[in-house]
Image: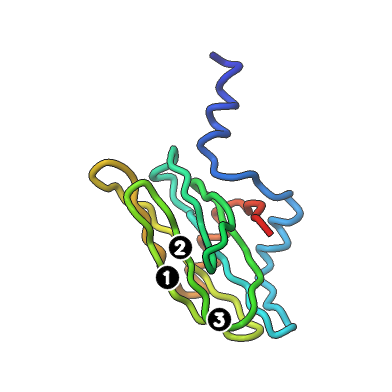
Amino acid sequence: MLVLMPVLLAACAGGPLATVEADAAAKKFVAPSDNTANLYIYRNESFGGAINMNVFIDNQRVATTGPKTYIMKNLPAGAHKVEGVAAEGTSILNIDLLPNTIKFVWQEVKMGIFGARNKLQEVSAEEGMKGVQESKLLLHDK
């Protein structure tokens, strides 16, 4: 049983984590200067810890979140569709990113009738930075 414990714990953690160095760099919250924007999507709660949720941006899968994880994605300025897919449905957030800015989205986990739900919400920079600091950076799809 002790041999299986790391495997079981890893299965609950979402997708693969980035390096400690990449996590530290992302937590400096440096706005881009090339007319793009940085979007942080985070899950800083332990609630729903056994539940992994896929995140899509503009219909492209980005990563699978787990408890205490986040995604940082550099995107072109403009309108984007963010989707969080859970057992009981999909949360969709349309967000407009201005050039050379940073925005934060909280992926809140909620209990549904038969499984987990999620709700994507844009939050303030102060709240977003706090949530990201409590979480670890995920590797994301290109």
Q: Where's the N terminus, which quadrant?
A: top right
**In the rendered structure, which amino acid carries the disc numbered 3?**
Leu
Q: Residue at x 65, y 46 (%)?
A: 17
User: Looking at the picture, does residue 108 appear above or below residue 123?
Assistant: above
Drawn side of residue 89 relative to residue 34, left or right: left
User: Looking at the picture, does residue 59 appear above or below residue 32?
Assistant: above
Mark pair 1, 3: CA separation: 12 Å
| CB atoms of marks 1 and 2 within 8 Å | yes
Drawn side of residue 109 relative to residue 74, left or right: left
Q: Which residue is drawn at 34% across and 54% down?
A: 89
**In the rendered structure, which amino acid carries the disc numbered 2?**
Glu
Q: Mark 2, mark 3: which one is toward the viewer?
A: 2
Residue 94: percent from the left, percent from the top?
44, 75
Sequence-earlier tag: 2 or 3: 2
Looking at the rendering, which quadrant does residue 29 occupy?
bottom right
Residue at mark 1 = 93
Residue at mark 2 = 83
Mark pair 2, 3: CA separation: 16 Å
Label 2: which secondary element: strand
Looking at the rendering, which quadrant does residue 92 occupy?
bottom left
Q: Where's the C terminus, which quadrant?
A: bottom right
Sequence-earlier tag: 1 or 2: 2
Label 1: which secondary element: strand
**In the rendered structure, which amino acid carries the disc numbered 1?**
Leu
Residue at mark 3 = 97
Label 3: which secondary element: strand
